[in-house]
Image (spheres, rainbow, N blue to C red):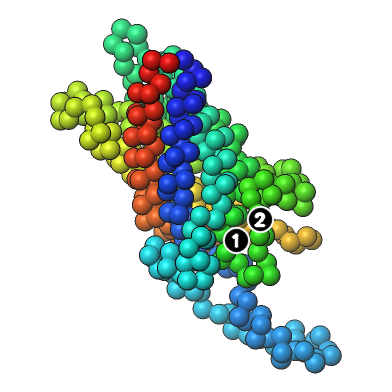
Amino acid sequence: MGVKGFVEGGIASIVAGCSTHPLDLLKVRMQLQGESHVPNPALQTALRPAFAGAGVAGNVSHLHIPAPPPPPRVGLVSVGVKIVQQEGLAALFSGVSATVLRQTLYSTTRMGLYDILKQKWTDPHTNKMTLDRKICAGLVAGAIGAAVGNPADVAMVRMQADGRLPAAQRRNYKSVVDAIGSMAKSEGIASLWRGSSLTVNRAMLVTASQLASYDQIKESILETHVMKDGLGTHVTASFAAGFVAAVASNPVDVIKTRVMNMKVEPGMAPPYTGALDCAMKTIRAEGPMALYKGFIPTISRQGPFTVVLFVTLEQVRKVFKDL
């Protein structure tokens, strides 16, 4: 029975992850808007001819160049159009192999563990599970799932963000396997768990809010006889659960994306020393609402993702019911 929960959750998660991948990519690109350490290739190119014949390095040090104004923040549609124009339609699926691996490791684990805990903690007399137990089950399942899936998560973020870098600085990973191998070789095995504390925290919030709220809302709908147990109930409960999960997880998700995507140059201090440092620098430079950057694509993705996830899960459960 326990294994079945992992299989059912894994299938539903992979279907949901692949179908909403472009929205996840847009979310990542929007979350990275405004980072001050991203190089300005136009400025660098403009400076090279001016100093091509300069023989004295000191002349350069005394030149004061005003900092370029921050790029305008653009919305979901504008980001999508820009990506298609500059990188092609296929760019919307950059890192989809990492999404498949991430869902296979992370979501399969969290969905399976939540199902096991749900069975153990459900009252046998009432056949119900209290909300606090649902939340606890989500927290535990999310933490373990995130720890297992972090390497694929790092690879996915980097592959999705690669197109925004100047061509000479892109990592150009061929696949998720190449990404993980390259990171392990050039940055060490520990780099595969970069931002893992954030991944775990986000996964705990997402899993607890998403799975617990879906079960709770679905039960409330059925108990009040607003709707019968069917597609309408599944869609309503899952979309509401997606909204709750998006609100709860977005700030952690922004910090996670930036920490995972940061490029550490040899001999140079990293842009962020950790999650707290990233959060403080982001708030100081861009304001508190920067932690909700990408919220529109987050909810635009989280809503459909959660709907596809639970609707697919309910259908897969019907297929596996008698197995």
Instruction: Name which residue lies at 61% across and 75% down.
Output: 40
Hey, what amino acid is under mark 1? Asp
What residue occupies the far right of the structure in this picture? Answer: 55
Q: Nearer the viewer, residue 217 or 160?
A: 160
Residue 108 versus residue 281 in the image, above or below: above
Quadrant location of residue 323?
top left
Secondary structure beneath dot 1 equals helix
What residue is disc 1 on?
162
> How far apart are labels 2 and 1 at the CA level?
9 Å
Instruction: Name which residue lies at 34% across and 40% down.
Output: 307
**Residue 98 seen anywhere in this rendered image of the structure:** yes
What residue occupies the far top of the structure in this picture? Answer: 125
Hey, what amino acid is under mark 2? Tyr
Residue 99: give x, y in percent of width and height. 53, 45
Residue 87 versus residue 122 in the image, above or below: below
Instruction: Name which residue lies at 31% across and 13% down.
Output: 127
How crowded pointer 2 is (Cα within 10 Å; few <14, some 14-19, many 20+) is rated as some
How crowded pointer 1 is (Cα within 10 Å; few <14, some 14-19, many 20+) is rated as many
Q: Nearer the viewer, mark 2 or mark 1?
A: 2
**Residue 139 seen anywhere in this rendered image of the structure:** no
Q: Nearer the viewer, residue 122 or 3?
A: 3
Residue 275: give x, y in percent of width and height. 58, 49
Task: Choose the circle earlier in sequence order: 2 or 1.
Answer: 1
Q: Nearer the viewer, residue 61 or 91?
A: 91
What numbered label is drawn on residue 173?
2
Cβ–Cβ under 8 Å for marks 2 and 1: yes
Residue 62 versus residue 221 in the image, above or below: below
Q: In the displayed structure, does residue 13 sit left or right of residue 130?
A: right
Secondary structure beneath dot 2 equals loop
